[in-house]
Image (cartoon, rainbow, N blue to C red):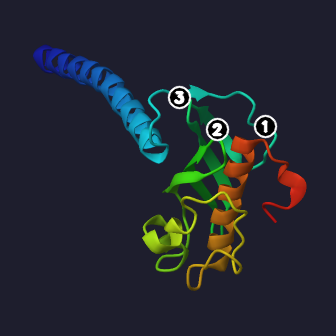
Amino acid sequence: MKKIVISILVAALILFGASYALNGIASKNAQKEHLWLMQTLLPGSETFILQEDTDDIEQIWAAYKSDAGFVVETVTNGYAGQIIMLIGVTNEGMVTGLVVRDMNETLSLGREALNDHHFLSQFLNSSDEFIVGENVDALSGATVTSRAIATAVNAAVSYATGADIDSGATS
């Protein structure tokens, strides 16, 4: 009986040690992936500095500054919950890349924003104010989701350029 208890304790210690060691590796891998994604969204950028002044715009969760511009992490309310995005914006306000990181939108409708390249590409290489129904075609059956994404992109551009968000850019 004593050998069984000791064996269980040794096995538990080994599992705890392995879990602790792997947790550090998982964290480093997540950081590498995040850096790679930011470099992809804002081409020509190597390093990013987390900005502290993101409280002025409601939709901005975090912003990372590089020489070329910003990668802005946004949170907006869609039809079925929050939509979390990363958006690359040059210092001049040009959108260079965007990716939806997390959402709970309706399957086959709003959830299409995760991988609908035609929809997402409407925001690229432009610094215009994005308005669904004017210069942005909504996802079919997902107008609320489309507007939420346009709001997020407008907020990111406003942050990067220092524009007044109350000017109607996200209405």
Asked if 61 appears above or below 80 in the picture, the reply is above
- Give percent across and percent down for residue 64: 59, 33
In the displayed structure image, the side of residue 77 where residue 18 appears, left or right: left
| SS type, badge 1 | loop
Q: How many marks?
A: 3
Between 127 and 80, the one lying in front of the other is 127
Asked if 128 appears above or below 84 in the picture, the reply is below
Which of label 3 and label 2 is nearer to you? 3
Place residue 76 in its image quadrant. Answer: bottom right
How crowded pointer 1 is (Cα within 10 Å; few <14, some 14-19, many 20+) is rated as: few
Q: Which of the two discs, 1 and 3, labels the residue nearer the N terminus?
A: 3
Place residue 10 in its image quadrant. Answer: top left
Amino acid at pointer 2:
Ala
| SS type, badge 2 | strand
Which of label 1 and label 3 is nearer to you? 3
Q: Is residue 55 visible?
A: yes
Looking at this view, name the residue that lies furthest to the front: 92
> To which residue does mark 1 refer?
55
Asked if 137 appears above or below 1 in the picture, the reply is below
Q: Which of the two discs, 3 and 2, labels the residue nearer the N terminus?
A: 3
Residue drawn where x is 83% and y is 51% of the image: 165
> To which residue does mark 3 refer?
48
Give the distance between the C-alpha atoms of the residues marked 1 and 3, in whole angstroms: 19 Å
Asked if 20 appears above or below 84 in the picture, the reply is above
Q: Is residue 79 visible?
A: no
- Give percent across and percent down for residue 104: 54, 64
Amino acid at pointer 1:
Asp
Amino acid at pointer 3:
Phe
How crowded pointer 3 is (Cα within 10 Å; few <14, some 14-19, many 20+) is rated as: some
Where's the N terminus, which quadrant?
Answer: top left
> To which residue does mark 2 refer?
62
